[in-house]
Amino acid sequence: MSSAQPQQRNPLSNWSGLVTVVTRAIKKIKPPVRMKISEWADSFRIIGAANATPGRWKTDNAPYQREPMDCMSDRRTRRVSLMWSAQVGKTEIANNVVGYHIAQNPMSVMFMQPTQSDLKTWQETKLTPLLTDTKQIAEVVAKPRGREGVNNQLMKSYPGGFLMFSWSGSANTMRGRSAPIIICDEIDGYSVTEEGDPVQLLHQRSATFGDLSKLLEISTPTIKGFSRIEKAFEAGDKRYFYVPCPHCREFQRLQWSQVQWEKDEDGTHLPHTALYYCEHCGVGIEDKYKFSMLEKGVWTASKRFMGHASFHLNELYSPWRTWAQIVESFLAKKAAGDSQSFINVSLAETWEEDGEVINESTLMSRKEVYVAECPQGVIVITVGVDVQPDRLELEVVGWGMNEESWSIAFAVLPGDPDDFGEHSVWNALDDYLDRRFLHESGVELSILASCIDSGGNNTQSVYKYCAKRKSSRRFAIKGQGGVGVPIVSAAKKKKSGKRGRPVDLYMVGVDQCKTLLYRRLEKEVGTAGSCHFPDHYPDTYFEQLTAEKCITRYIKGFPKREWVKIRPRNEALDCRNYAYAALNIMNPSLTRYQKRIEKQAAELESVQKGQTVVETQEETTVQQRKVKPKTKRKRRPRRRSGFVSG
């Protein structure tokens, strides 16, 4: 009996699979076509539906983006710096650089954001659509939870390299990593680590790649002398975008000083009349000419190119913003007393600080006589409390429209903050914060919210007090210095003792508060954000309010702005900042509170009128009773009766 012959397999049975494998292999080993980044983006980049201009990417929509992108694929350029405003598409340039070095010219890329929160936001809103909507990128990036590579929140792999993420506050995300392509977004928001400036740390690690090393820095500027992007722009060849006038054909830079608009007879601004006036022929340019001007625009350097290309661009160039919209933004920020954000964010220029030292005698001369405890402009009241080892100091501040403020009362409550007995300083504080203050309209206003400092030696006592009074809106806060720290951060849960109730702790950016306050102290009384002081305030209050000044110190070669005392006591300054923090925590609708005051005042007036009418009627009745003549009674003749008279 013969054994069964093994069945022979046809070598052509899996021909299609073999073709697929070979085709993929050829794609891997085939050298990429040399393209500029703008050419790659125009050929392959797809913009998601959530974007303002969805569909295929077109560099012609914003022609000024072409040259900065192509510099990142130019062998002669080692560093590119963009000091650009918002609303001009600077983030999309970074996204195209990332996509190009993933799909077209694979290299490792390191992307850094100011904070972990900023990085997460960029990943969710910008990076994820880039990786999924553009087919050429989606085919090569490793899939999440796949075996072919890495794809997580800190790193994504693809053939030829890795896309790695970092944020400036974390030295661990920078340590041990290197890549030839470094992209640093919003560098003016970076914080200096113990090892030094994060941008320079990453750039040094990329130096090992030699000629392949490139650095892209992007940011809106901040404070003059402290802005990283301003220093980077000055170190480069300083390129500006020149566009031709549609009327005289002369080239010029678009500058805010050339934008003009009209006012009506009452002095009300009319943003819809805004035009850009040519600096050569003086003719007003309408929005409809902007796109043709951008098409013919050219970048012009003002310094010699030495491998570092730097670009400046403001919001006037944005094809997505009209002259009228920019004017509206300017007027709104000016009314809110926030001109700095317009200078930084819209004009892409640094803000030069003024008035960092205030003369207390100037403030003393501005004291006013209030008709009532709360003048007519006050809408809500907040309190800031500073905790000292032997006392509490507090200030009551009234706030009106556009954050115009009125100081109402300043008080000192003696006592040990660690004592919670029957006659403790905390009971005295309760009595004070439960007060009502008479408004000029006749209405009584209660305190909206209070902030109590917990950053001293009595932290647990402050926690214990605030934990039981959350419904009364008495918040525990802690000051935090440094550039870029917001005025109020999200609350964090803290324990008030081992078995105590949890308490919400708010971090307050005291440097930002002081800068804003000093800026407002110089404003003319009656304008947006200006400050009013009553005549009963002592001179010592103004000495404490101006007890600090801002100086510049250099730490490891980098400038750092710090507030230092020029007088031993600064409690009034702290209380004022804490009262402003309470306003920011509550963020009340001042219009709604204003209407409430007007309604209560009207009701009070009607009640008073009603009482007056009743009293008048009662007085009239009484007077009538008093004036009523008395009529003499007629005497009846006396009837005599009896035995004799009868």
Image: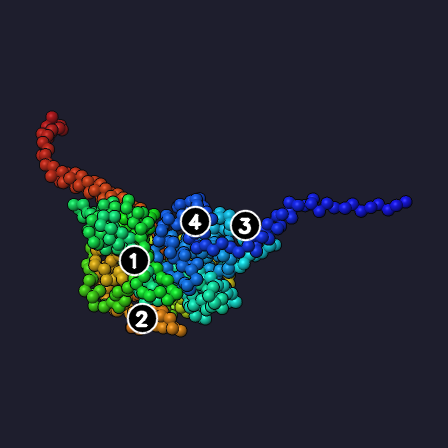
Residue that badge 3 annotates: 139
Q: Residue 259: where, in percent of width, then height?
A: 24, 52
Q: Do the residues under discs 3 and 2 have CB atoms within 8 angstroms?
A: no
From this viewpoint, is residue 453 visible? Answer: no
User: In the drawing, what numbered circle is on residue 514?
Assistant: none
* SS under mark 4: helix
How far apart are the alpha carbons under marks 4 and 1?
A: 33 Å
Query: Residue 530 versus residue 412: which sits nearer the camera?
Result: 530
Circle nearer the N terminus (1, 2): 1
Residue that badge 1 annotates: 343
Q: Do the residues under discs 4 and 1 have CB atoms within 8 angstroms?
A: no
Please tell me which residue is depicted at 10% across the width and 36% down the height of the picture. Answer: 629
Given this view, does label 1 or label 2 mark the residue nearer the observer? 1
Q: Residue 593: where, in percent of width, then height?
A: 30, 48
Residue that badge 4 annotates: 42
Please tell me which residue is depicted at 49% across the width and 68% down the height of the picture. Answer: 208
Residue that badge 2 annotates: 551
Q: Do the residues under discs 1 and 2 have CB atoms within 8 angstroms?
A: no
Circle 3 packing at 10 Å, graded few (<14), some (14-19), many (20+), is few
Given this view, does label 1 or label 3 mark the residue nearer the observer? 3
Q: Residue furthest right?
A: 1
How far apart are the alpha carbons under marks 1 and 3?
A: 43 Å
* SS under mark 2: strand
Circle 4 packing at 10 Å, graded few (<14), some (14-19), many (20+), is some
The quarter of the rendered structure image containing the N terminus is top right
The kind of residue tagged 1 is Ile
The kind of residue tagged 3 is Glu
How far apart are the alpha carbons under marks 2 and 4?
A: 49 Å
* SS under mark 1: helix
Q: Residue 436: where, in percent of width, then height?
A: 30, 54
Circle nearer the N terminus (2, 4): 4
Query: Residue 307 versus residue 177: which sits nearer the camera?
Result: 307
